[in-house]
Image (cartoon, rainbow, N blue to C red):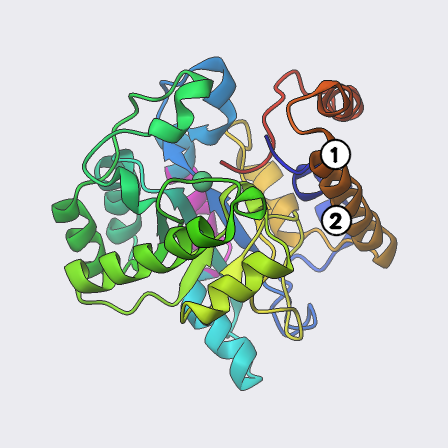
Amino acid sequence: MCDPGASLPLPLRGAGQRADRATAESRGGRVPVLMYHSFSTEAAPAFRRFAMPPERFRAHLDHFDAAGYTTHTYAQLVNAFRAGTTLPGRPVVITVDDGFRDFATVGLPALTERGMTATLFVTTGCIGSTAHFLTGDGEGDRPMLGWTELAAAAGAGIEIGAHTLTHPELDRTRRAQLRTEVAKPKLMLEQRLGVPVRSLAYPYGYYNRRVRDAVENAGYTSACTVLDLACGPGDDLFALTRLTVADTIGVPALERLLTSAPSRRDIARAHAKRMVWRQVRRIGAGGPVMAAARALRDARTGRGDPAGGAR
Ligand SMILES: [Zn+2]
């Protein structure tokens, strides 16, 4: 269900080959934006890689602290890019997609206990209900955050962003529905929570020019996708890239993810894969072409799970 160009991990270089204390400045202003989903040890097989064990998530946060990282919201990063400034020290942006209830019970306390922040992208049609959009993954009953929990998160300094109304593949959504999927969540969240909602995360990372324009026309000032690259100044603010944090990523792998510096060739390859995957989806979604493409991708990556890097 996901874009392999967006989800295939780029070759990671050993930490010893890089400056251990690379700052945003020393990395040309590039900042890693991490993408989490659920915080739980319980998950159906198809969703397993999106459910981060709580202990592991807390270990990630402790690593940020020990290694001198500072957490920022997605809006703070966008503001810095827009202003042409660099976030100080070793910045990292934590984003959490979908709005599962375990953010309130695991994610939020872990962050606030450490004085850290994050950005939560919420699927507004599922607020106070369950993850209907995950029915195909056997996770349709997964509990989602309610309005009271969202208000508590916003009150604790967590940035609230939008993740559409029903979590569709936006690039395959008809024009009228696209407008609703993009515009309504912003209105709902702003009216109920009284906070500005500036950013949207594309479900599955899927977007095209039409989707990008709809997001901008709805009043957002930025949007993010998934491409397993740190984003940097000069990137399209409506297509900032994020790094997938799968459930199996422990602290050493996390540090490699944070400090990996993909070459121009890696970046070109990632973009090329995304373009190829777009074409495959366009001509054969759900059909044999798609199945063959997934099989090829999984064979190359050693993944048994056909799920991609984002939900
Ligand atoms: Zn999602």
Q: Residue at x 66, y 29 (%)?
A: 285
Is 29 covered by the magenta stretch? no
In this picture, residue 39 sits left or right of residue 252: left
Kindly report which numbered mark, 1 or 2, lies closer to the viewer in this rendering.
1
**126 left or right of 283?**
left
Q: Is residue 12 visible?
A: no
Tell me the element at label 1: helix
Which circle's residue, 1 or 2, is located before the other in the chain? Answer: 2
Determine whether 57 is above or below 285 in the image.
Answer: below
The amino acid marked with disc number 1 is Ile
Give left or right: position of 68 versus 163: right
Q: Quadrant of ligand 1?
A: top left
Residue 289 in view (yes/no):
yes
| Residue 124 pos. (x, y %) | 29, 46
Q: Identify the residue at image location x=41%, y=67%.
A: 218
Q: Quadrant of residue 107?
A: top left
Mark drawn on residue 283:
1
- Callout 1: few (<14), some (14-19), or many (20+) C-alpha neighbours within 10 Å? few
Q: Which residues are magenta?
A: 58-69
Name the foreground residue: 278 vs 64.
278
Q: State the quadrant of the N terminus.
A: top right
Q: Is residue 156 above or below residue 235?
A: above
Q: Which mark is residue 16?
A: 2
